[in-house]
Image: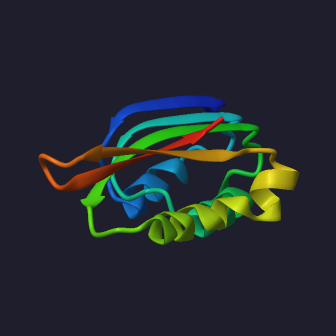
Amino acid sequence: MSSTSLIIEKLDVTIDKLESFLLLTPSLIYLKLIGVGNVFDGKRWEEFIQINLSHLDTFEFFINVLISTSRTREDLELIIEPFRSPFWIEYKKWFVVCVLNHFMMFKFIQYQFLIL
């Protein structure tokens, strides 16, 4: 029997390692990721879910990413845009929200991606 629900807290791995792990759980219906890192490639997630997690009904992720303050609002739009495809919006009805917090003391911007 395989797991159908998985919550990973304190996530801090590469997207390659995460995908390798998730390949072991093809029957997932619910997946929740909480952590940090660069694991928010919308197109890559779309393809991975379609091919490897076809039963996934609920996908939530809360990922914090620190990047340079030289990034612009347009840069943020480029990151979010792949999550606005028909797969995310129409088929799965999963919506991604990005919360932007400025930490001028450290000269970094924190992006937090949430799927509601």
User: Looking at the picture, how far across and down is residue 27, in whole percent?
Assistant: 69, 41
Q: Look at 66% across and 31% down and name the residue there.
A: 4
Figure coloring: rainbow
Q: Nearer the viewer, residue 55 or 36?
A: 36
Residue 22 is situated, as x and y percent measured from the top left of the image, at: 52, 49
The one nearer the camera, 38 or 56, is 38
Q: Position of residue 63 (x, y in %)?
A: 42, 43
Identify which residue is drawn at 67% across, 56% down: 49
The front one of 74 and 92 is: 74
Residue 28 sits in which quadrant? top right
**Quadrant housing the N terminus:** top right
Taking the spot 83% from the left edge, 62% from the top edge, the residue there is 86
Residue furthest to the right in view is: 90
The residue furthest front is: 104
> With 90 as the anchor, is 53 left or right in this view?
left
Query: Is 42 displayed left or right of 8 in the figure?
Result: right
- In the current view of this chain or complex, which residue is farthest to the left? 105
Q: Please identify the quadrant where the C terminus is shown.
A: top right
Residue 85: which quarter of the image?
bottom right
